[in-house]
Image (tube, rainbow, N blue to C red):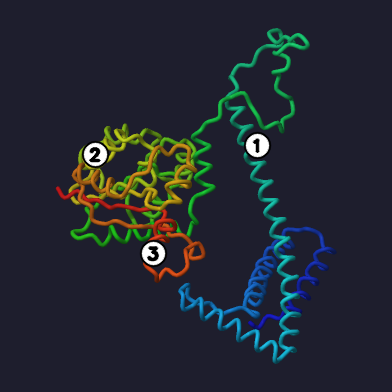
Amino acid sequence: MPDAKVIDIVSAIHKRVSERAASPETPGVLEDWSNDLARLSSAYNTVYCARNLAGSVPQLPNTFVGFVAGWLVRISQRLLFWYTPQIRYFHEAVTNLLNRLCSLEERQFRAFMAMADRLDKLERNARLVTAERSSWPDASPSPAQVTDPPPGSHQADAVVSDDPSFPYTRAAIDPGNFCFELQGRFQSHVQADTTRLDLYKSAIAALQPAVPEGLWLDVGCGRGAWLRLAREGGHECRGVDSSPAAIGQCRAEGFEVSELDALEYLRSMDDRSFSVVSAFHVLEHCPFEYYLNLVYQIGRTLKPGGVLLVETPRPGNLLMATEQFWMDPTHIRPIPAPLMEFLFEYCGLRVVHRFDVNPRPESEHLPFRELELSSRLDLLIYGPQDYAVIGRRDS
């Protein structure tokens, strides 16, 4: 067990709670609280690690040999506890104490999550109220024009409540904002996104001959993750998206973006305008004729030696094809990798790289993957969730 002692952690928590209960909430105290929470989180991580290590089986590989070794270790532990009951009693006492501490932390975590959910609901209500106010006409009717509806009429029943906290409106909801919020809810972890995008950036930088210098375009730029990476690499970049929410977020970070239909935007551009064009999770939202022309126009606007990078869900993953793909109501149909590669070739782009990305956590995979049947079934069900293709215009 690490140097931290459980009794020290409990004493420190009790001391801090007592001190803060008797002190006023000033900015300095709030800063101390933040530091205390950070230290408390680190201490609890130590406690969790100690609880998981006490009496547990060492981490073993997820193979048949590891499975058998785990059983042998458990049998050895049982024999050891039977011959030395004092070890068993000590283990049970420590485990009970750690379980109580961890239960306290879990209750606190649930309380914080409930507060976060409440805050999310308040933010959604605020957005609905803002949308309602933006739909109001500029000119308000004069008092002479306002007449009270007769009691009991349908018009009277339709009057909106005067309660300013009432979150609903008769105005139509913008599905674009819904989809933007949905993508934010289910998007990948930020660190995973950064690692994946760095992989693409390194692959483009390693191409020989080198990609020509010039403008980078991100089609469906969303929250600007790829634009941010391109700017950090010293590249001039632009974005195009049809979502006002996405455009507003990108402009807030200083990016040059256009709120236009992507195909319309590309048709307005000159030949050989871009060095790199990217489209992350765009084509699966489009009808076939649209994305066929979109890739064709990208090929036209690429410089010789320029690159097109496309990422899309991988339908070879059954969970993705049957459930997760349809979590976005604007998805039309998945695009298998062989179809994507033929599309590139048809539009004059040579495929130079293909990546299977966004793997599932190790805990979700099937055991005994050293067996061929288990390995193939695991790949079919729990394989990578997305794939990416890099194509290049040679001339």
Q: From the viewer's perspective, is residue 184 above or below residue 74?
A: above
Inspect the image, locate mark 1, and give the three-letter code of the amino acid beneath it: Asn
From the image, state whether disc 3 or disc 1 is nearer to you. Answer: 3
> Quick check: marks 3 and 1 in contact, CB under 8 Å?
no
Disc 1 designates what residue? 125
> Real-space Cα distance between discs 1 and 2?
43 Å
Disc 3 designates what residue? 373
From the image, state whether disc 1 or disc 2 is nearer to you. Answer: 2
> Real-space Cα distance between discs 3 and 2?
41 Å
For the residue labelled by badge 3, is the local secondary structure a helix, a strand or a loop? Answer: helix
Q: Is residue 11 left or right of residue 272?
A: right
Disc 1 or 2, which lies upstream in sequence?
A: 1
Q: From the viewer's perspective, is residue 190 above or below residue 58?
A: above
Q: Residue furthest bottom?
A: 83
Label 1 crowding class (10 Å Cα cut-off): few <14, some 14-19, many 20+? some
Q: From the viewer's perspective, is residue 323 above or below residue 243?
A: below
Label 3 crowding class (10 Å Cα cut-off): few <14, some 14-19, many 20+? few
Location of residue 352 in the rendering, given as x and y in whole percent from the top left corner: 23, 56
> Real-space Cα distance between discs 3 and 1?
51 Å
Q: Is residue 282 left or right of residue 344?
A: right
Disc 3 or 1, which lies upstream in sequence?
A: 1
**Quarter assignment of residue 81:** bottom right
Q: Is residue 294 left or right of residue 86?
A: left
For the residue labelled by badge 2, is the local secondary structure a helix, a strand or a loop? Answer: helix
Residue that appears at 70% across and 92% down: 83
Disc 2 designates what residue? 296
Pick the residue in front: 228 or 334: 334
Inspect the image, locate mark 2, and give the three-letter code of the amino acid beneath it: Tyr
Label 2 crowding class (10 Å Cα cut-off): few <14, some 14-19, many 20+? some
**Quarter assignment of residue 211:** bottom left
Location of residue 103 in the rendering, given as x and y in whole percent from the top left corner: 73, 66
